[in-house]
Image (cartoon, grey):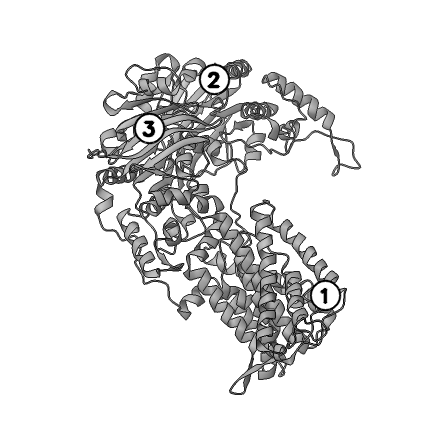
Amino acid sequence: MSGLSTPTTAASAGPPPRFDLRRVLRGQEIGIFLVLVVMITFFSLSTDRFFTPINLSNILLNFSWTAIAAFGMTFVIISGGIDLSVGSVMALSGLATATLISTDKTPFADPTSVGVIALAVLTGLAVGATCGLINGALITFARLPPFIATLGMLQIARGICYGWSQGWPVQRLPAEFMVIGRQNIPIGSFNLPLPTLIMLIIAVLAWLFLTRTKWGYHIFSVGGNEQAARLSGISVTRSKLLIYTISGLAAGAGGVLLTARLGVAAPTAAQGYELDVIAAVVVGGTSLSGGEGSILGTLIGAAIMGALRTGLNLIGVEAYWLPSAQGAIIILAITLDQWFRLRRGQTTLFTRFIKRDETPPSKAKRNETSPSEAEAD
Amino acid sequence: MATEPVLRMLGISKTFPGVRALDSVDFEVYPGEVVALLGENGAGKSTLMKILAGAYRKDSGRIILNGVETEFTDPHHAQSQGISIIYQEFNLNLKQTVAANIFIGREPLRGGPGQALRWVDRRLMEAEAARLLAVVGSRASPRDLVRNLSVAERQLVEIAKALSVDARVIIMDEPTSALGQDETENLFNIIRSLKEQGRAIIFITHRLNEVMEIADRIVVLRDGKLVGELPISEASVERIIGMMVGRTLDQMYQKEAARIGEVVLRVENLSRRGVVEGVSFELRRGEILGFAGLVGAGRTETARLIFGADRPDTGTIWVDGQQAHIRTPEDAIQAGISLVPEDRGNQGLVLVLSVLKNTVLPNLERMSRAGWLDQAQMAREAQDYVSRLNIRTPSLQQKAMFLSGGNQQKVVLAKWLMSNPKVLILDEPTRGIDVGAKSEIYALMSQLARAGMGIIMISSEMPEILAMSDRILVMCEGRMTGILNRDEATQERIMALATGHAVEGALP
């Protein structure tokens, strides 16, 4: 009974995890956080129009919807999947909300009343969540790879946008609705855009969900090793349905906010946003092979992408060249991130892929055996 | 037989994190000789051969091939030096044809626009593959996809691949475990003809009767060390087993008497088509029930059925006298059944997650209220088990992938003990872990049994089964062939049941 009863020096107990800035800075987000700091410093030194309250407020506003959709995408990517449909789902959700309250189209007598606007917003969110749920069902019940299922949804949702609107943008939205996207909250001389505040609230909720609830743990385990998760009593099916529904819901929220900001729901809205969203998540340090990632990282990733766009604009880079710069920063950020992790002996995002066997393991049993299994007959 | 060895390995050592896999091992083989390399699970046979084949780098030691000292940097290099290995795990690309697999990386070329860009000569490749397949007695066509072949056929393709290289040393790592009687006999004929051509053959197997039939000499490893060697004329099955097991069993296996109580688990007529047929047994509190049998006898499959990992076609399960309706692992955990699976990396652990997250995974329901996790409770319980099981980890936040095999296995045990099960099923609980951790796990099993847990231990290690079990259930080809009490169990009786022979006095 030797080793069992003796106390050991093995692991130190340590208090339960609590928010601690030093821990965060030593954590996995440090690499990309430094990228953000360097970038902001560079732009601030390059032009005096960058580090101003108005410009910062603008940057925050401009990446808010991307970030919201990216939080949902973080769940998906941690679970080892991908959701390509978020751009289309954003557009469809915005269109659903706008159709209910546009003075051209509304079925309601008074589309400016708080009740109707709330209903329209909830409908937009529900449309997003439903698209996500369908994605989840295709992935779990029809056993489609997430890439395929959500690629299909990308096209279907976009098609519905065009067909439903007959290609025309839905305009003439009540001012009471557009407040959601345009209101600022003054903090001293700084104006915090309402969409940014909503984004930050969602970030906190997503962070709590992922790190403090059993469902969050389920998502990490499903992404890290689906078989082990299942054998630990976790329902992989339920988890995936939940994950893709959340991603759809987040895209819906982003779409409604975007519509409120622009004051118009175009069937072409948010085209290609899925790539911005995925880029924010990946730059934020979430592993495409699943099991690793964080909301804080995604927030920083989205901020990097947002600050980059505005910053390059301000220092005089032609808008035509922006995509190339964005591509370069994605590559640079992830290279730096890998370098940081390697230096600290961590696994990197792409050097490690969990091996998943084709054959059921119970049949793959081919072991070295003992003397015992021996001679026989 | 020639007097100069074709290959000499001197003082080979290799260390993996937490395990000294090989400790200064000497090994040699002569042209035209068949050497059987023997040893228990984890003795270091495969490691030694992988070093020889260039798949692992040795830490120290020398390899002398044909009198010239060589250093194998990678498998391709070893192959070009005339060393060919047939691995225990298949190394075939399932989606490619048989011919493409045999000649992978060495495809015959012809024509083409230039030296750098030439066509694969498919006709020549397939003709040559067909010839090799005929030599090994395979009925497969060179154009068949490997995916569509049976396990035995795939094994023959591996052998054909090894023959396609003009190898001076051919290593066969358990080549017969997937083969039937006729195919084995055919393989032995191939080995005899290779021998006549002056090639050296290193043969790893667990079937000692095959050793007696085909080998010229045996070499035994134990715990990474060379125990000894014998010409086959001086060897006997008993003597070989003695050399292989060797250690003082009573120190290793810490079996303590536990009070055997009420029936905690009753399984009736459990079946799944083609895998398990009509398994029925009872397990009592405080009892360790060993599951013995050959690989593929259906023991793991039975455990998975009980645990709800697979769905049975028929069968009823009672826990504590109550019928349990188990459809998923979730249900099994609720009913008080835990399963420590055989394959830690793929089934037991989420390697990218921390020790803490791994241990709490099956226990999230208990540790949360309305989905909200009690962080303090999680840390406390995880820490408690890390201490009790003596898990060597720098912190609870360490990722499971960075722990040694023995410590990983203890993390898997911790996660299931934390769920406080009535029935604990252990599938090959000590496979691939070092002797110290093994001994700790045996002690733990005894302790749990004394605390009233019912334990099922699936094991392919006969000494482990004999030392730890109160009763032994033996399976063969999906059926239960008998249950032996501790005092009536012997290696011979178990092996007879495991190979489908009736044994007097054994139930049923």
Camera-side mark, 3 or 2: 3
Which quarter shows the N terminus of chain A?
A: top left
Q: Is residue B227 above or below residue A49?
A: above
Question: Looking at the image, which is closer to me, A171 or A15?
Answer: A171
| Image side of residue B355 versus residue A143, left or right | left
The residue type indicated by label 2 comes to Glu
Q: Which mark is residue A268?
A: 1
The residue type indicated by label 3 comes to Phe
**Which subunit holds the residue at mark 2?**
B
**Which subunit holds the residue at mark 1?**
A
SS for callout 3: strand
Camera-side mark, 3 or 1: 3
Residue shown at 60% from the left, 75% from the top: A61
Residue shown at 49% from the left, 66% from the top: A296
SS for callout 1: loop
| Image side of residue B409 versus residue B62, left or right | left
Which quarter shows the C terminus of chain A?
A: top left
- Distance in Å between CA atoms under marks 3 and 1: 65 Å
**Residue tagged by mark 3?**
B281
**Can the viewer see residue A334 in this picture?**
no
Q: Is residue B93 above or below residue A146?
A: above
**Residue tagged by mark 2?**
B33
Measured from the top left, where is residue A120 in percent x and y? 61, 70
The answer to whether tags 3 and 1 share a subunit is no
**Which subunit holds the residue at mark 3?**
B
Measured from the top left, where is residue B144 in percent x and y? 65, 26
